[in-house]
Image: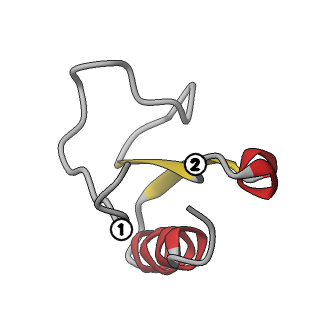
Amino acid sequence: VPGQGNLFASSILANYFINNGYIVGAVETIGAAQRGGSVVSHLRVSDSDIYSPLIPAGKVDMLMGFETLE
């Protein structure tokens, strides 16, 4: 659901980690929200190289949801 602050929260978190010396990989899906779909952000934070910003299934350390229906 658009308008829940997903992209804003993702940006705040990414900037926090970058400013504290971490490497951040980020990817967001935005276009689907214009058609009533979900907005999804992936952030990978590491102290070493990141080769893909996408998080594999079952490998997430923190998951945040802003909409109870999603």
Which residue is rendered at x = 79% and y = 49% of the image?
A: 35
Report the amino acid beneath label 1. Phe
In the rendered structure, which disc, 2 or 1, sits on the residue that comes first in sequence? 2
- Label 1: few (<14), some or many (≥20) within 10 Å? few
Mark number for residue 66? 1
Q: Position of residue 17 (x, y in %)?
A: 40, 70
Number of other residues with Cα within 10 Å of mark 2, as a class: few under 14, some 14 to 19, many 20 or more:
some
Q: Which amino acid does label 2 sit on?
A: Ser
The secondary structure type at the circle numbered 2 is: loop
Give the answer, above or below, for where 18 lies relative to 50: below
Disc 2 to disc 1, C-alpha distance: 11 Å
Residue lying at 56% horizontally and 25% vertically, measured from the top left: 51
Render colour scheme: secondary structure
How far across and how far down the image is residue 6, in percent?
A: 51, 69
Residue situated in front as seen by the camera: 31 or 51: 31
Residue 33 in the image, given as x and y percentages of width and height: 71, 54
Compared to residue 27, the image places residue 13 above or below, namely: below
The residue drawn where x is 41% and y is 29% is 55
Horizontally, residue 32 falls left or right of residue 59, namely right
State left or right for residue 60 relative to residue 9: left
Quick one: SS at disc 1? Answer: loop
Q: Name the residue under label 2.
A: 38
